[in-house]
Image (cartoon, grey):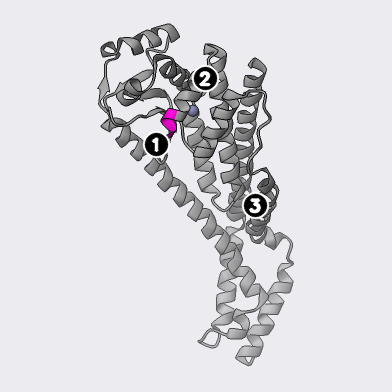
Amino acid sequence: MQYLRKYRYGKAQLYFSLIVSINLACFLVIITGAATGIKGYISDTKFVYEAVTCCGSVCSKCFFTLHTIATTLPWICVAILFAGIAATIHRIFCMLSCNYRFVRSLAPLSVDNYPGLKNILLSTHLDDQLVLFDNGVLRHAFTSGLWKPKTYLSTGVCSYLTAKEIQAVILHEAHHVIKKAPLMLFVLRILCTLNFFLPINRYLLNLYSTACEKEADDAVVTNSGEPLELASALLKLSRSYSPAVLYPMIPFSSGQRIVEDRVMRLLEPHAVLPSFGKASSYPLSLLSLLIAVTICFPLYGKFFTPLEKIECKTKVCHMIKCGF
Ligand SMILES: [Zn+2]
């Protein structure tokens, strides 16, 4: 199991590095192209504007020349860049405010009122990183907080699960706390929003989340040696409401397919499980590459197109239409 734990840890790290490097590289290429070419786009646009309005009205022939279309393309790419930045700022604000409001709405309780829970925390040395909150209806356990993450456990979970199941849940969430999982997921979601046009992001993000969950499960089995208790807790809590939209937080169980996959691993650790969605990774990668190149090319297109030739073509169009 120790080998398996390292393997999962390596996978989660690999997906994290992959998402960060793909998105940072894409963003840097686009913003560098836009920053270095902005003067050229402005002068080109002015030039085309003067050409198409030379007779006092928009010249249809000039308007649809290749040069005119090529002048508008970089602006579309710049608009996509700013749309990504605006969406990212909006998402950061929404995620932080939603999470802050949700956590503030919880009524913390002292664990002294729950001797069973207190004993678990003392035996696992996790008493300083757990917040018990008063909600007998909501059966919910999650990890939240960017800089100093904590595990949140509702009283509904404490009354619903057995002591060993609660211990499994706490150990699982403790692993997310150690790895600062909410912060990692927050960074990835920001980058994916920034490059919202890359379809591979959603696929990689799912792979990362799944690998993180399996890594935390492996940590529980390594520390407690009781996979059945964890599987039982997973099944019980998977039927409960999970406010998955309240990022950055990591719920104990979310996504029916992921939960089934995790339970199967815990029940049959040596079985080879089918990997879902692997076939779609190649088309998604190709499509993402195509979209990225389509967006980047107009920003750098000026380096590949001789300026004199373009000016000449536009002037000819201008002269013919205006009768000079
Ligand atoms: Zn988890």
Query: Observer-nearest residue: 35 or 177?
Result: 177
Circle 2 Cα neighbour tier, 10 Å, few/some/many (<14 / 14–19 / ≥20): some
Q: Position of residue 30 (x, y in %)?
A: 61, 51
Report if residue 146 is visible in the image. Answer: no
Q: Position of residue 183 (x, y in %)?
A: 48, 31
On residue 228, the disc is: 2
Q: Of the two numbered discs 2 and 3 on the same chain, state the one appearing first in sequence.
A: 2
Residue type at tag 2: Leu
Question: Start and end of the magenta stretch?
Answer: 236-243
State whether residue 270 is above or below residue 317.
above
Query: Observer-nearest residue: 121 or 198?
Result: 121
On residue 174, the disc is: none
Residue type at tag 1: Ser
Secondary structure beneath disc 1? loop
Q: Position of residue 254 (x, y in %)?
A: 46, 35
Quarter of the image holding residue 65?
bottom right
Q: Is residue 236 left or right of residue 72?
A: left
- In which quadrant of the rendered image does the N terminus lie? top right
Q: Which residue is mark 1?
A: 242
Distance CA(mark 2)–CA(mark 1): 22 Å
Distance CA(mark 1)–CA(mark 3): 31 Å
Q: Of the two numbered discs 1 and 3 on the same chain, state the one appearing first in sequence.
A: 1
Select label 2 or label 1 by which is in front.
2
Report if residue 282 is visible in the image. Answer: yes
Q: Is residue 120 left or right of residue 187?
A: left
Secondary structure beneath disc 2? helix
Quarter of the image holding residue 243?
top left
Secondary structure beneath disc 3? helix
On residue 288, the disc is: 3
Quarter of the image holding residue 290?
bottom right
Residue type at tag 3: Ser
